[in-house]
Every structure is written in C-alpha cells, then in structure tokens.
Amino acid sequence: MVEEHSCEISMKIDMVKLKFLVRKYINKIRRQSKIYLKNFIGDIYNDLNIEINVTIAWRAIKAAGYLLYGNENQQFARCRKFICVDGCFSKGAFKGQLLAAVGLDGNNGIYPIACAVVEQKGLENVIQKELPEAEHRLKKRTSRKQGNWKEKAKKREADGVFRASRKGAVKHCKICGIAGHNARSCPCRSELEEGSQPTPARKKRKTEVSSSQPEPSRVEE
C-alpha cells in the first residue's frame, strides 16, 4: 500500500452538465452581450475550480443565448413575407456598394435583416439569377429627378415597365417564356426583329392616299 501519492491533481472534468452551466451563468451572459470563450472558461475555473473544454463552453453560451434572445426562426416568425433590397454607392477611400435587406414586422415597421458591402454593378442580374420566382417590382421615385434611367428612356418604354410590374406578380415573357421580364424588354426580341424586317405598311398607305387625291385646280385670272 502506497501511503504518499505523487500523482498530479487534474482539474479537467468532462462530466459537467450543460444545463448546470446555463443555469449558473445565464445572468452573467445577460449582462455581457459579447463574452469570449477564453474569459468564460477562466470564470468557471475561478468559481468552481474546474477546467472544461472549448466545446462545452461554446454550447453553454449558445444555449444561454437561445433562452435570452431566442433563435432565428422565432425572431423572423412574426415578420411579413416582404423583403426589400436596396443599395447605395460609398464615396471616399473605401469604394464599393452598401446593400441592405429590410422586412416588415407585424406593425408594418421596418425590420433590418442584413447588410453587406459588395463590389457589383447592380441588383437586377442578381435577383433574376438567384431568385427567379420571387415577386419583385421597380421602385418609382417621386422626387424632381425621376431617375437617370427614366430620363434616358422613352416615355412609352418607361410606362410599359410600370404597367407590367404594377400587379405585383411574377412577369413571364411571351417570347422566350422566362420569368423576370416582359416581351418588350426581352433580349431575344432584337434577334427576331433582325431576322424578319416588316414592311412599313402605314407609311406606304399614306403615300397611296396622298397620290390618289386629285390636285386642286388652279384658277386663272
């Protein structure tokens, strides 16, 4: 029988329950919105004189956060099925485009979802590629400057775009059948027009009518 022990004392314990850590440190996690794993493990060692691994500490912080703030599914469950994506160009030393996605809550208030800084030209290609079946429409600005695209475009084309997107439904092209644009803005329309050039019937008819009318008789004095 060995009376004197020479083995080292180990403070590492893997039998610590997750519910025990959440119940004991939930108030501390509530006070500290951003708590680091290293500090959390050090606090447990100072209070309980035990060492836990990083996985248990991370699970305890995550479980306490679910009890305090709820998970993502519960947070977005009260929002309406409406997401608005808008962007603006950043001026200065840091170039790029700031994108923000917002939704509507139950009280029709703006609810921010996410924001990011990207480098791209626009959102129309992204929406058509990533969300082809999503309901979307263009936004008409009511300021003095009605937008550069409307000033450069013709009145007939601009009004046609708003009439097509006024109903809020997914637009399907009558020429190619792809969702996201109408027949007027279809890229295949130019190819069809180049292949078959129609004859100007109205202009020809006007010339025929004008030629068939008798010339007025001159009155000689």
Image (spheres, rainbow, N blue to C red):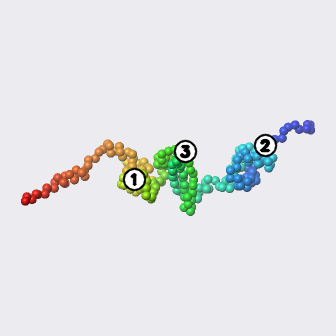
Amino acid beneath label 1: Glu
Quadrant location of residue 1? top right
Q: Earlier in the sequence, mark 3 or mark 1?
A: 3
Q: Are marks 3 and 2 in contact (CB under 8 Å)?
A: no
The residue that label 2 is drawn on is 12
Would residue 59 be found to the left or right of residue 193 on screen? Answer: right
Q: Earlier in the sequence, mark 2 or mark 1?
A: 2
- Return the x and y of residue 97 as percentages of the image width and height: 52, 47
Q: Please tell me whether mark 3 or mark 2 is closer to you in this view.
A: 3
Judging depth in this view, the residue of 77 and 142 nearest the camera is 142
Q: Secondary structure at mark 2?
A: loop
Question: Label for residue 151?
Answer: 1
Q: Earlier in the sequence, mark 3 or mark 2?
A: 2
Cα gap from disc 3 to disc 2, whole angstroms:
50 Å
The residue that label 3 is drawn on is 93
Characterize the local packing of mark 1: few (<14), some (14-19) or many (20 or more) Cα atoms within 10 angstroms.
Answer: few
Amino acid beneath label 2: Lys
Q: Residue at x 10, y 57 (%)?
A: 218
